Amino acid sequence: MSRDNQDVRVGPKVLVDAALLAVAAYLAFRLYGVASGIPRALSAWTLASVLLAGAAIVVVRALWLPFPRRANAALLAFTVVASGVLGNLILEARGRTLLGLLDTPLARLAASVPSAPAGNDGAPEAAGEGEVVRPPDLRDRGDVIAALAASGVEAVRSPTIHPLLDAADANAIPFVPLSGMAHAVTVHCNEGDQPEFPVHRSDRFGFNNDDTVYAAPGRRVLLLGDSYVYGFCVHQEQTVAGVLRRRGHPAVSLGMVGNGPLLNLAALREYGRAIQPSHVYWFHFDGNDVDDLRDHELRSAALRRYLDSSHVQGLAGRQAEVDRLWRDIFSDREKWERVAREHGDAVAAYRSGDGGAQAQRALEDARKLSGLGGLASVRADADLEKIVVAILGQAKREAEAMGAGFTLVVVRSAASYRAGWKPKHLDAVLAGAKSQGIPVIDVDDRIRGGGDPERYFPRGHQSPHYNAAGYALFASAIAGTLVPRENIQIVEATFGLNCKDFAVKPPNVNVIRAGNSTPTMAAECNGKKSCDYIVGNAKVGGEPADGCSKDFNASWRCGASAALKRLHLPDNAEGKSARASCD
């Protein structure tokens, strides 16, 4: 065969191989959906992966072409890639992406492919036979608010507290609000997976809850956190609190966009006392909670007052004032956009090293927290982690004073599953929670164990929150810890409190601390009608005070009851049985 004829045949063969690969990849995608039991709709990510694989085959096979054609193939590949990158950058500047644009037509193509069934978990319902899936509503928030106004509905954007902190410090506003307007139609966001733009009506305190939750019998479950607890970019019934309510657990979210540890503590104190929850779930997002504490919360003198456990503004009884403040904010958009810009500039300057006096005052206030008398700074990572742990401990004590249990919930970002991003502060926070006997909920294994973490996030969005299925996963994990109303819920258990000040012989040390048996007794007894707990050194990690005859104390509630039950075993409790009962 002549070289010319060979050249003519090589080109088409490259294209044929690429096409065959694309078909094989698509069939593998379909077979995976069948094998996993979760039929999967064709998405922009899937199509992009197939196209990139095909392009790679074309480039590799082109290496066997003669030089002129090889150069042309390389130039074509470069042009296509460069055009895609440039086009995506232009779209990103407008809040769009190429993958996002592909999702709309692909949603129509996928109409006949059923999605994962919802059941009661808040995930999207499968499309009915012949039903056309409506593409996502990609309008921005301002357009939706304008459209509602044109139809006679007054709506506001979802609020955030950060920009108001500097205003409170300058006495430009009379107090620090921790919620939005009550009973307000509120528009927040759509990250590209909601056919109907999420709009909700806030509750009586200005939070993202169905107000009927306050009429539910019994005590409520309280959720604290940032935009993940607020339920950003999904409908109210698809939020963590919304899914819990639909499952029969009266859950109240105090989540607000941008909240960090100190704002969470403030919300717990202001509204927890009014709501009197049976259990508090504190959501920790390692992506920015520590940064928010450093850059926003500790900078604010007005907010730092909450480091004093006696400080309260009485916000639960001042909602009319909160509403008036937000109406003023929303009625003068230019003024408050300027306030937000000035706040952003102040944060940027603080990050660059300015604000030494602010940092010193913040350090003095932070040292008032339990166990932080020797704190070195409010900017170093290790010191910030100590402050977070101290705030968690304070929150736990305040929740228990309300008669509530307290649990830490770990939230990981989409980057943890897409780019191998590692949480920076999480290990220190978890170690601190463990040292204080705080139980932890972490759905990471469930997300990874499903084999497709992307199903819990809007596809095609670069930095998304969770989607409805993702929020439902957290709700399911929380629901699993909510014991029946009549069963045991351990509040605290301590082995050897009578020996706390006992002087042990060196080189031994006295490591007695309150709550040292709480995690093990809770693990053995929570959810049971009665429980016999064997007291001993092994339950607290070894001998805590050698040479001292130790007692044992425990307290627990029966389900949602506020009444505490207690038991006490006197000296020499080692090896004895402590019986907790709700019979």
Image (cartoon, rainbow, N blue to C red):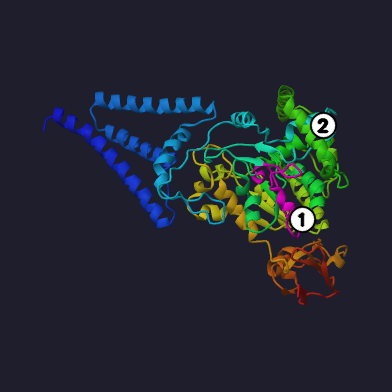
Please state the horizontal and vertical placement of residue 11, each as a whole percent of the image: 23, 31
Residue plotted at (79% across, 47% down) = 271
Badge 1 element? loop
- Looking at the rendered image, the quarter that the N terminus falls into is top left
Please state the horizontal and vertical placement of residue 291, each as a whole percent of the image: 69, 38
The image shows residue 443, relative to residue 518, as above or below, that is above
Q: Going from the N terminus, do you reach mark 1 or mark 2 first?
A: 2
Residue plotted at (86% across, 43% down) = 314
- Left or right, 118 with respect to 325, comes to left
Reading the image, the residue beneath label 1 is 277
From the image, state whether disc 1 or disc 2 is nearer to you: 1
Badge 2 element? helix
Near mark 2 (Cα within 10 A), the count class, few <14, some 14-19 or many ≥20, is some
Q: Is residue 367 visible?
A: no
Residue 168: mark in rendering: 2
Which range is magenta?
201-230
Quadrant of res 64: top left
Q: Distance between the residues labelled 1 and 2?
A: 29 Å
Q: Is residue 422 visible?
A: yes
- Looking at the rendered image, the quarter that the C terminus falls into is bottom right
Residue plotted at (24% across, 38% down) = 16
Please state the horizontal and vertical placement of residue 156, each as a whole percent of the image: 68, 33
Check disc 2 and give the amino acid type: Ala
- Left or right, 317 with respect to 18, comes to right
Check disc 1 and give the amino acid type: Pro
Quadrant of res 289: top right
